[in-house]
Image: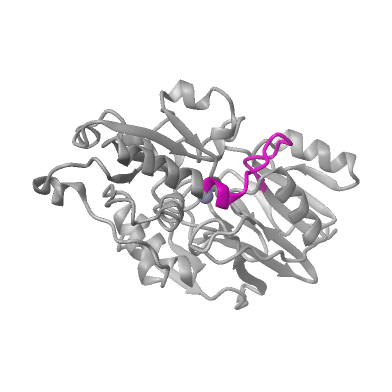
Amino acid sequence: MAADPLLVSTPAGLYCPAGEFYIDPWRRVDRAIITHAHSDHARPGMGRYLAAREGAEVLRVRLGNKAVIDAIDYGEPISINGVRVSLHPAGHILGSSQIRVEHRGEVWVVSGDYKVAPDWTCRAFEPVRCHTFITESTFGMPIYRWPDPQAVTREINDWWRANAAEGVASLLMAYSLGKAQRLLGSLDPSIGPIFTHDAVEPLSDCYRRAGINLPATQRPEDWAERGGFGTAMVIAPPSVVGSPWFQQFGAVATAFASGWMMVRGTRRRRNIARGFVVSDHADWPELIATIRATEAERVLVTHGSVAVLVRWLREHGWDAGPLVAERRGEDGRGEEEGGEEGDGDI
Ligand SMILES: [Zn+2]
Ligand SMILES: [Zn+2]
């Protein structure tokens, strides 16, 4: 280990003193490298942003026209004050990146949010060798093991088909960036028309322009005069429940797609009829396999079940610790529980 760490936790966020830049900062800084466009990582007000080219457009939708966004391709190294920086696919959402930082032979990689399960709406995760790996651990507990994504896709389409047969619309709640598009891409459009909320549609258009093939969707407001939502699939963020927008569909069956649907009681507390386990984060076996694949000697853990993963890594021979200055809640549910959409815990 070099005497001075390459990246340090500061009140403004993760900082590289040698390069004078921040990664996913939460206070206003001059230079921010952004792992992905979810709002707990990409905050407004930074002097300049650097992100992967594939994610620049969704970042623009989230941050607005005034933001100064520099884009680079995955794997294209640049030098910032003598520090070599490159971005590598994280498999989380369109344009999501791991950030590789190299200085004087020392290599650190910041994972951002990541998953390794197949998702053709974004580029697959690529493990990057490093000395120190900063990993997220949103689902960093051994109980989290995702079911086969193809089986879940079948369950969702079967649920939609059964509701349509009864003339009841299917309202599938999901976060508007990433999860919504991944779900859209797995629907069987022969079952009925597909509607999306206005929070989802502009982001889906970014995906389409990036060449991701999503089925046709429409706004319910444009459909109303044609009547009847009885065979419809509706994809919307969880915040719509109980709103007038929600009520326009008449009789609906509700479901929520999230990794948290694995936890007993989550669905009941939210008063949602069905839960589908679909996560854009790594489950426990994927976290461990990924950490191994980086060949890192040292692992710093952030975002979620930090203590559990740190203890396991130490017991298995890693030099591991929490990335200090955690700003999120102890249980790390900020993003998937609704913090991502700023709509609270519903
Ligand atoms: Zn995220
Ligand atoms: Zn996150």
x, y (%) of residue 305? 67, 35
Q: Nearer the viewer, residue 161 or 252?
A: 161
Position of the C terminus, as image quadrant, is top left
x, y (%) of residue 34? 52, 59
Confirm whether the magenta stretch covers residue 296: no
Left or right of residue 58: residue 326? right
Q: How is the image coloured?
A: one colour
Q: Nearer the viewer, residue 325 or 314?
A: 314
x, y (%) of residue 128? 72, 66
For residue 328, say whether it is visible. no
Left or right of residue 271: residue 140? right
User: Which quarter of the figure has residue 159?
Assistant: top left
User: Which quarter of the figure has residue 217?
Assistant: bottom left
Q: Which of 229 and 218 is in front in this view?
A: 229
- What residue is drawn where x is 41% and y is 35%? 255
- The magenta-colored residue range is 136-152
Confirm whether the magenta stretch covers residue 141: yes
- What residue is drawn where x is 66% and y is 57%? 110
For residue 69, say whether it is visible. yes
- What residue is drawn where x is 70% and y is 52%? 134
- What residue is drawn where x is 39% and y is 64%? 207
x, y (%) of residue 241? 31, 31
173 lies above or below 113: above
Residue lying at the far front of the rendered structure: 165
Position of the N terminus, as image quadrant, is bottom right
State whether the magenta stretch is mostly helix, strand or loop: loop
195 lies above or below 244: below
What is the tally of numbered marks visible in this picture?
0
